[in-house]
Amino acid sequence: MSEPKKVGRRTFLNYATAVVATGVIVGAATYLATPKGATTTVTAPAATTTVTVPGTTITTEKTVTTTSVREQEKVTITFWTWGEMAMAFKALKSDFEARYPNINVELVELDLTSLYQKLLTAFATGTGAPDLATPLLRNFYEFKDGLVEVTDNVTPLKDYYNEFTWNCVGSEGKIYGYPGSWGPMVMYYRKDIFEQNGIDIEKEIVTWDDFINVGKKITKPPDRYMTVICNTSYGTNLFAGFLNSRGGNIFNEAGKVISPNSLAKETFKWYIELATKHKIAYAEKYLTEPFWAGLKANKAATWFLHAQIPALMAQYLPEQKGLWKAKAWPLWDRNAPAVTGVWGGWFFAIPKQSKYPNQARTLAEYMLFTLFGIKKLIEVGSIFPPIRIFIPGAQVNPQPYLDQYHWKEVRPAPLFRYGFTWSKVETIIGNAIDLSLAGSKTPEEAWDAAEKELVEAFGKA
């Protein structure tokens, strides 16, 4: 097996176009930095093949190498991750360890909250961190000071990452992680429920006003609601996705709070009134047991999350396979831009406490930049890569749980700024959500109080 090569722009292009050549992704030629009509040699675990896509001829050869130096010492590295990423890693672990026999990987599967808390504790105490972890992009600034800088490794790939995720892992010109996914949102809906009510969802739901009007036909409380929204601090992220899709932000480029923020206030009121005024929604903390139980009981006809969640839907709602479909994010009005919001994403982070940072980097780069690794992320984990070549309309095989080419439902998203301590933002706005839903404050009162608290914590723009 050949020694791994140093990463570079052309090397990464070779990995990405190999995926195109072998039928995982097609139709992305306009995203490739290869001159029209050029021939590109690509490494892939297959016999030599030449594939032509518009403007580019791609030749694949037999060997895949990753980008980090193969170490001679046999070591065990610890990898903390969660959910769909853990599912994908289990599917590629044996291949990685066969290719890198001197690196064993101990997988520690955690839920998102536990990973966040354990990583913060490890950084605060100076001990107990893993060699590699997958924290959320929105928590980047809370972890940055405890992470290995990877600027030299990842900067050559900057042009291949989308702007949203690239901006989430950098500070003062330095990069502290490899963006691993991002979460452009779609609307998931129960096809059978809409059909039973004689509703053609594609024709009848174009705007959010349409959504509310149709929701009043679907909703039959307490057994059936049009949708379920997210409460508690976690609900901040769903609210932020709606605000993001309107082109709004909470912070400016300097990390200061936009105040007064009329668009955020209006969006917050709209979000709360789905439940309190229109009465087409109930509230539950997303991805918890009560949340999944509600969906299993057919309580919600729709819900909203990123395009990679079908892998978890298959785990928690196996009996509803094929009943759920994805639909593009509705428009805010019929003349509004066709965009969506983003529910974060995650990145590969190497703590400074790692005893084996080179091996950890090898694993991260293997998962992101080799044909076998990226295929497993997509096929098993339903991961939506943050790389420009992976355009939404380029899905070759339908997502098996949805039985749908759901990437085509993904719309572009405006840039959103998470600020420096997003967990504090979650607490402040989450409290406002809960107070509003409980009727303790009007949405306007709750938002005004939350905005004041945000300004006190982070400063006014």
Image (tube, rainbow, N blue to C red):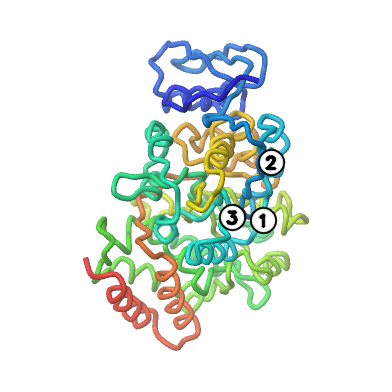
The residue pinned by badge 1 equals 109
Who's the residue at 57% across and 39% down the image? 359
Mark 2 or mark 3, earlier in chain: 2
Q: Does the CB distance between marks 3 and 1 fall below 8 Å?
A: no
Which secondary structure lies at badge 2?
strand
The residue pinned by badge 3 equals 188
Q: Is residue 98 above or below residue 299?
A: above
Q: CA distance from mark 3 to mark 1?
A: 26 Å
Q: CA distance from mark 2 to mark 1?
A: 16 Å
Disc 1 residue type (three-letter): Glu
Between marks 2 and 3 in the image, the one whose residue lies nearer the viewer: 2
Who's the residue at 30% across and 62% down the image? 251
The residue pinned by badge 2 equals 104
Q: Residue 341: x percent and y percent? A: 43, 54
Along the viewing direction, whichever of 212 and 28 lies nearer the viewer: 28
Q: Residue 246: x percent and y percent? A: 35, 57
Disc 2 residue type (three-letter): Asn
Q: Is residue 80 left or right of residue 172?
A: right
Who's the residue at 58% across and 16% down the image? 60
Along the viewing direction, whichever of 30 and 104 lies nearer the viewer: 104
Q: Is residue 106 left or right of residue 215?
A: right
Residue 149 shows in the view: yes
Which secondary structure lies at badge 1?
strand
Q: Residue furthest right?
A: 319
